[in-house]
Image (cartoon, rainbow, N blue to C red):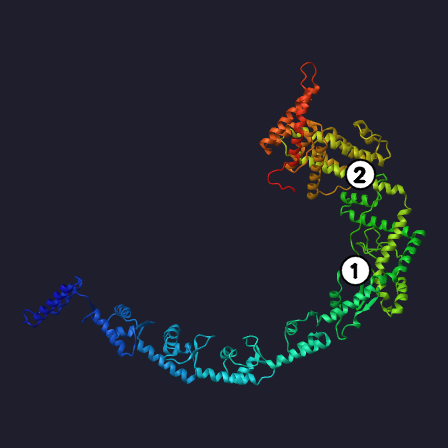
Amino acid sequence: MASDWEEIKRLAADFQKAQLSTSLQRLSERNCVEVVSLLIERGLIDVIYTTDGKEYLTQAHLAQEVKDELFVRGGRVNLVDLAKALNVDFEKVQRVAEYVISEDTTIKFILGQLLDETYVERVASEINEKLSQSGEINVADLTVHYDLPADFILNNIMLKHLNRIIMGRQDSANANIFFTQLYVSRTKAKLRGALAAITKPTPVSAILSQSGIPERLFNMLINEVSVSGSVPSKSPNAQYIPHVYIKMQSEWVRNFYRHNGYLEHDSVAGLGVSDVRNFIVKQLPNEKIVHLKKCSVGEKIIDNITSSLDECISSNSYLDISTILPSNMSDEDTEQLISIVLTPAKLKQTIIFGNVILTTKFIDGLIKPCYDIAQENARQSVGNGSYQQYMAEKLMKHQDVSEKDTFGNDGKVDKREDRRKKAAGGKGGGGTQGRETKTKSTKKHTRSQKGNVSDSDEDMSTGYVTKKGSKEASIELITTKEIAKVLESGLEPEGLEDLSKQLAQHYYPQLTKHALAKAHELYEISLHQNSQNRRQTHANFQDKLNNLYNDIRLYEKGIKLLPASIQPQLVKYLLKSLGTDFCNEIFFYVAAECNLNSNGATLTVEQRNKITQDCSQEYRATLQKLNKAIAASASIDDFLEVAESSLQTCSMILKKIDKKKDRNVILCHKHGLLEQLSNCTDPALVLHLTVLVVFTVTTQSMLHASGRHVSALLSFLQPHFSQEQTQVLTNYHDLVMKLLSAENASGDNKPDVDSITKQLEALTPVVRDVAVNFKKSGLTSAE
């Protein structure tokens, strides 16, 4: 590069000599331009054209002119103005400016302007003068005045020269605001004087408006000013609370509580306390305070009430709690205090009427004669026939309502409602068993002014309103006047006769229920014993048939899990056994209803046909379908459908399917099989029971199968056995088959039965252990 530059110098000297020579050797202006262009193209020189193209500048010369212009303009110059002044394109000036900035770190480039350090220090000095004059300055105002970014002024001028050129202090709450220490001290003195003169809670806004202190300075200096008071928050609506005022509140609360043992919330709120409960807790930290709705009471009052109540219960008397409480305590607080003091154990021993707590033993002594009156009235109502008339009218009302609700718009009877009416009212069927049973009423009815009670679980309601608005038959066995008269005589010596009517209303439903129960008991005794037997027999038949129906349904689920090839045989066996039992129970029931002879424990097909022909017309069609379903070995679904129809015909209710109960039945079935297995010694039956137990555990379903299906079941269950279990059960099965063949064989080829029996006896505990300890993978012991 040095040699090239030397060559350029020589060329320039030659060029100058040529210019000074005669006209024959001097170059024209055009030739000069061409020569310079050629040098630029070959990269021998690096020059910059001016805007008018008449002058050339080097990069170094332009950079020096930029620095000179920056100095002349006071340390701040805009690149647009610089380009005009230097007569150079803006882009070239911008590139040279970037070069200058990279070479000199004291020069900054802000918003298209160059700024040097002298300008920044001069601005800092000006800001310091303004700050000293006003005492407070905002960066936002400086941004408008100097036309510079707020971040640049804050970081490169204010903070950089703070406490060096700019003598001030930055606001901790707002970084863009600066104060002088003198201004802060003067404001702090004004704030201290204003707060010291306040003796009651005063809004912060009022303090600021009177003293002229800015809000931001107030929030900053409030913690630095040593005054006796506090500001709860920095919100504009906050109040300054002097310490003398807080001290007065605390002393009043402590003194009042010490003398009275309680505090009224309204009185505490009148002192200017907003959160009364928390204030009380803070002022009385070591006291056990119970906060009620309108007041707060201490442990002293609670203990006083508790001791008085314990004494009342132990002496079987009463307690007027208003006599031991402050006179100005509201009824709501009194009730809340009673609920706090009365534990569940004490609540069972007391009855509350307003502010009076009566022990049950005290009331029992007063109410006891009323029970004798209720029993005597019940006995008289049954004796003179009024209770029997009431029962008859009530039954007729129930039947009328059922008939009106049963018929639809077309006058047709809903079969389900008809069956329900038969079961409840006793009509239809031609028989005697099960027709007088009654369904329990669960609908609650409003108690009337005269004291009529609602329906009870014993079906002894005294009145309700039907859809038409007509009242049901009612009977009144005891009146509130009779009860009040008895109670008044016992309460009058204690001065509590005003409670007689309230107690009478309270005990009226209980005494009425007792009288109705006694009357119903006497009424039931008067009925024939045969009627009770019929109801019991009907209920027993219904439960037994429901159990058989549910067992058949559950066994069907187990059958459906097996291969289709053996399902028909198992269905046939199930219908032949349990299906026949169900069928026989229905025929026995109908025979008893129609007074037909049905001797024996089981019925043959001919006997069932005989009963079908001789029974009432309402049973005949159902019995024919049931008998046909058994004889034809129909499917389980068809049989269950016919079975359900037969239950409805016999006025029996089929219980709803309950999966939880089904699981319990299956579990009980498995335990029953295990119990049989533990007591069983017959090898064939041991194998049969083992297979049924394993099937139940594996499929969580019941199975009703005969011994001839054991081989097929073993094949079905083989994937669930371990190799050892499979070997044991296969050997045991083969030995059982050999034993059965040996017992049926004859002649000289008869196998050794004793040897086979000994082998079976040795394997029987192992087979039992397989059944007892068998678990399906994924199941817990509980399942």
Between the residue at mark 1 and the residue at mark 2, the CA separation in whole angstroms equals 43 Å
Nearer-the-camera pick, 644 or 509: 509
| Mark 2: few/some/many CA within 10 Å (<14, 14-19, 20+) | some
Give how far across and how far down residue 448 sits, in percent: 83, 60
Which of the 4 image quadrants contains residue 730?
Answer: top right
Q: Residue furthest top?
A: 748
Residue positioned 77% across, 37% down in the render = 646
Residue tagged 2: 541
Q: How many marks?
A: 2
Type of amino acid at the residue the image marks with label 1: Lys
Please indicate, yes or no, whether residue 710 appears anywhere in the rendered image: yes
Please indicate, yes or no, whether residue 428 appears anywhere in the rendered image: no
Give how far across and how far down residue 234 sits, in percent: 54, 75
Mark 1 residue element: helix
Type of amino acid at the residue the image marks with label 2: Phe
Residue tagged 1: 348
Judged left or right of residue 654, residue 157 is left
Quick one: quadrant of the N terminus?
bottom left
Give how far across and how far down residue 62 sits, in percent: 22, 71
Residue 11 sits above or below residue 571 on the image = below
